[in-house]
Image (tube, rainbow, N blue to C red):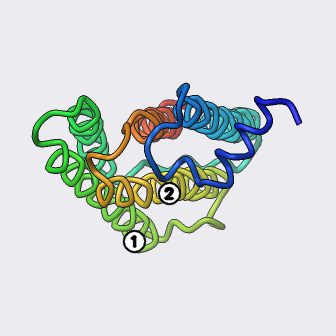
Amino acid sequence: MPETMLMKSDAWESRAWEGDDLPGGGRSEANRTVVFLMIAGAVMLFTTFTASYLVRREAAGWGKVSLPAICWVGTAFLVASSVTMELARRKTASARLWLGTTIGLGVLFALGQVEAWRQLRASGVTASSGAHSGFVYMLTSVHAAHLAAGIVVLVVALRRAGRGSLGGCAAWWHFTGAAWIWVAAVLTVF
């Protein structure tokens, strides 16, 4: 077995993503690759949904729905969480505090999203009310799933604070923030 394959196999067996970097930066390289592939997959998913949205909006019965105002409050929480994530990533003396703040802001965003769905339902807008409302629920739900995954990873990172880099966590978190801005823009502008 070639040495590089052995090293990758050893990295997998040792659960390298949970510990310190491997000699030669194997863990960091593997983490970057995995995070890149996850983000690339999510970009393809959101791109596909956006293309479907743009094609479908030309059909009859579109019935555009406005996002509740709480979505914009949530957007502010998500933008602020990107700042706190970056402060945590830069390994400041208070990285745990910033990481905890990032998690808190992410949870506030998620709670705001749940409230937005509640407000939509209270006003009679459900996923089956029309084509646009179906896309609103689909896009915001897919984003919420990606955000929830990010929160779980951040909680694990908080428990392990001080051991390893937050680069992959930060990349995913910044991506979920950018994805939300994209989703909100698509649902509002088009």
Question: In the image, what residue type sits under mark 2?
Answer: Ala
Q: Position of residue 125 (x, y in %)?
A: 51, 66
Figure quadrant of the C terminus: top right
Which residue is labeled 2 in the image?
149
* Left or right, 135 with reference to 169: right
Q: Can residue 44 be seen in this view?
A: yes
Helix, strand or loop at mark 1: helix
Mark sitting on residue 118: 1
Mark 2, Cα crowd under 10 Å, few <14 / some 14-19 / many 20+, is some
Tell which circle, 2 or 1, labels the residue nearer the N-terminal end.
1
Q: How many numbered marks does the figure carry?
A: 2
Q: Identify the residue at horizontal 59%, vertical 32% (top origin).
A: 26
Most extreme residue toward the top is 24
In this rendering, the answer to whether 2 lies above or below 184 is: above
Q: Are marks 2 and 1 in contact (CB under 8 Å)?
A: no
Helix, strand or loop at mark 2: helix
Mark 1, Cα crowd under 10 Å, few <14 / some 14-19 / many 20+, is some
Q: Can residue 188 be seen in this view?
A: no
